[in-house]
Amino acid sequence: MTVMKRRLGLWNGLLALGLLVPLMARAQTDSNAQPYLERATKLIDRALQERQAYDMLRELTLTIGPRLSGSPQAAAAVEWGRQKLVQIGADSVWLQPVMVPRWVRGEVEEAEIIQSTIVGDHPLTVCALGGSVGTPEMGVIGEVIEVHDFDELARLGKKAIAGKIVFFNRPMDPAERNTFRAYGGAVNQRTRGAAEAAKYGAVAVLVRSMTTRLDDVPHTGGMRYIAGIPKIPAAAISTLDAEFLSRLLKREDHVRVRLRLSCETLPDVPSANVIGEIRGSEKPDEIIVIGGHLDSWDKGHGAHDDGAGCVQSIEALRLLRALGLHPKRTIRAVLFMNEENGLRGGREYARVARQQGWRHVAAIESDRGGFAPRGFSVDAPPAVVEKLARWAYLFEQIEAGVIRRGGGGADISPLKRQGVPTIGLMVDSHRYFDYHHSDNDTFDKVNERELELGAAMLAILSYVLAQEGL
Amino acid sequence: MTVMKRRLGLWNGLLALGLLVPLMARAQTDSNAQPYLERATKLIDRALQERQAYDMLRELTLTIGPRLSGSPQAAAAVEWGRQKLVQIGADSVWLQPVMVPRWVRGEVEEAEIIQSTIVGDHPLTVCALGGSVGTPEMGVIGEVIEVHDFDELARLGKKAIAGKIVFFNRPMDPAERNTFRAYGGAVNQRTRGAAEAAKYGAVAVLVRSMTTRLDDVPHTGGMRYIAGIPKIPAAAISTLDAEFLSRLLKREDHVRVRLRLSCETLPDVPSANVIGEIRGSEKPDEIIVIGGHLDSWDKGHGAHDDGAGCVQSIEALRLLRALGLHPKRTIRAVLFMNEENGLRGGREYARVARQQGWRHVAAIESDRGGFAPRGFSVDAPPAVVEKLARWAYLFEQIEAGVIRRGGGGADISPLKRQGVPTIGLMVDSHRYFDYHHSDNDTFDKVNERELELGAAMLAILSYVLAQEGL
């Protein structure tokens, strides 16, 4: 109210000065600017003052814990998410059933250098990659051969690889400005390394952990086998032990490692995406999705990946409610299930969307950690990106006004294939891979202000899109 | 080299197409742009690849530890800094002697609610504020009165305040977008609270910790007495216990607390600023200072505050050396002593500068933590800010291209009074006060990429200023 009065005073002053005409022309083109900026400011204020996303994340990560698809914790998280969406006053809340894979790590995951002339028997810090087959109880033993990419593997060929344990040791490029690009440049070793090595007769693979740090914890993550190629066990090795093993291989021939993994894939189990929405007052059939994924790996707490995105999506709805905003179109929070090892939730949501004829204006995902927002990356034609860029000024007050072409998010990628513009919350990337898929990804690694600002970003963009369309 | 060849190829292609003339006109106006951008890019690459600042910070924080002015650790840090600057190949390295205050915390710092009807005897988490007098061995006992600002204190007056322990409990405003502004809005309770309360006969003060979080550690920091007003003991209380105490005061009259502090101020001791420089090849008498402060509080490791700024300054020189760059003007790293409780180092540097007639082009300080850089804040007339803003494009590749008017830094503020433009490295501010002046400010809270990027920022800006002047 103070602001409005002040502005009226300004109008009167300008009238007196005869300056009103040119300003009115400008005011027409900017007719909606001031209300949106005011609302954006209030959404950010409330997010920073009330910090409900942080409290929700504490519950999700410390009370429930990590939430691997098909686990009891994942089931508990589904019920938790449903209750939260009811509590914050969503107009409707429902579960969308989906069958998910159930891979379990089991009790045993260990690797050991055996009978090295230099270090004798020496343990290595490893963990199974998600989806890996286990080893026989006594383990797999093989001579280790270090390889950096699939071309090198092919050059070495069956003669060098057969019967060996292939050690993929290409680091994420530290000079990449954005760590996700560095990840993109290294992660095929994890996702396809076992299948590629098995083509040449390897008996197992060790993959350097996908992290920009030198640390002593292994970072897990998804991997896939290829039909018709033998399934061999695959484990991540900590970056510190990767460096150690690499140095040893330079000094000693025929280094042998024993790898033991008790992981296995059980039958699929029922699970669900959790959905809650604020129904649009004028065009309820047009939907803006905001979301993250409720499942995580079984290491750490799944705090940054992706508890953050889930609580931000719920908090965004809560903030809109708290300010009494009534969006013209429907804003729907979706907590997707099984992003990490199957994407079943994202696929099922898109399948149902097509079946039901849901009309999505856009889908926005937060799945890059609960760090300080920088803006949005948009996976859509340039004209759509330009339209979105009109709203950049709403985010500049928190230095997050970058809107540019880029990826949306894994869970919403099946919607993209239906022509829906998908949008990813961009955040500061430097710390993400310190924590990603490892025991480091715990609640205490999340800063509440950074987390809350991400929630405000989702609330503001979804609200503007609900009012203006795209 | 690859880049150069590719560019020559481009030139030839353009010649063939007859497109060279308009491009040459453009190339002249941008004559220096490409070399600077290439060099900036290489400086960032090297910083991210070699990560020497992070290794230095590990030594400074984990081997030496916190470095309160006048302590043995501060003395060790001076020698460490001198050796580092020699090691990285500075042209000259020297110590600039300065006498510093020596305040010591002592063994005892405790507070306890006594004989509350609700909680009985109940400990509170406190620590002495830097510079506080101690209490008698048996402590100071007083009824607690909660106050939020100095106006309220004045309204309450002697009648309400005399004989009491004043509890300053105004939080940092969580809605401030930049936490330093929130700090600025609350910190007078810490710096002047004791003196203001003593005017009305208070026997001690408890000050809510200066942090944006609710946590269970007290955050210390400097405080000052005023001549002619009694010196009363002053302690920081953790934000969680501040909330607890405040709630108790709403439910119970006459809550009494006993405060015991064994801190004291000893005679001044000799110490030093540590200085190392790369001498300018053309105008060696014109100096660009880059710096941070070597002292810290005695809590945590002094990692973000301000080990980060010190190792970034050393690393900036190392990076320039590693790339074989020969600046035209002198680039001088200064590790200032005693920023936290006296600013003696900063004052002495400026005094000597005036005495010696040193000509400073600019002084750049990093003292806002080793977080992701956003740009630079410049304390100088608008024309100088505009000149600096020409170089923003060099920093945009790491999303740190904001150059705007704002504070330089405490240690370089005495130079500012001599007309030197002072410049502060701006970084993401959200996490700083999680750690600031507390046991939380440890090495593990620093991300190596974020830290290194700050070093690259100092290297790039100091190099450009060394070449171009200001």
Image (spheres, coloured by chain):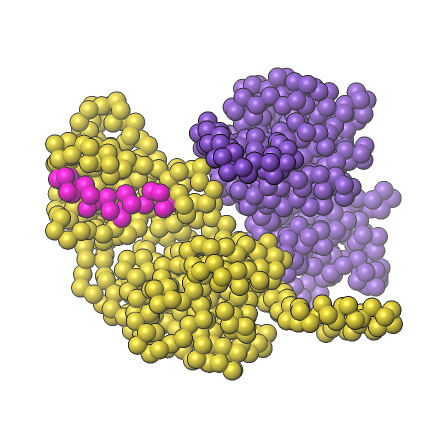
Chain colours: A purple, B yellow
The residue sitting at 71% across, 51% down in the picture is A184
Q: Residue furthest bottom?
A: B282
The residue sitting at 71% across, 25% down in the picture is A287
The spot of residue B98 in percent (x, y) is 27, 70
The spot of residue B289 in percent (x, y) is 43, 69
A27 to the left or right of B266: right
Is residue A83 among the parts visible in the rendering? no
Q: Is residue B252 above or below residue B370?
A: above
Identify the main secondary structure in magenta.
Answer: helix
Q: Nearer the viewer, residue A258 or A57?
A: A57
The spot of residue B162 in percent (x, y) is 12, 36
Identify the image quadrant of residue B201.
top left
Q: Nearer the viewer, residue B123 or A324?
A: A324
Q: Is residue B314 above or below residue A183?
A: below
Is residue B293 among the parts visible in the rendering? yes
Identify the image quadrant of residue B354.
bottom left
The residue sitting at 57% across, 63% down in the picture is B391
The residue sitting at 83% across, 63% down in the picture is A155
- Assess whether residue B196 is covered by the magenta stretch: yes
Identify the image quadrant of residue B198.
top left
- Assess whether residue B273 is covered by the magenta stretch: no
B14 to the left or right of A112: right
The spot of residue B256 in percent (x, y) is 18, 32
Quadrant where the N terminus of chain B is found in the figure: bottom right
A18 to the left or right of B113: right
Q: Nearer the viewer, residue A28 or A145?
A: A28
Q: Nearer the viewer, residue B217 or A219?
A: B217
Q: How many marks?
A: 0
Q: What's the magenta region?
A: B183-203
A391 to the left or right of B274: right
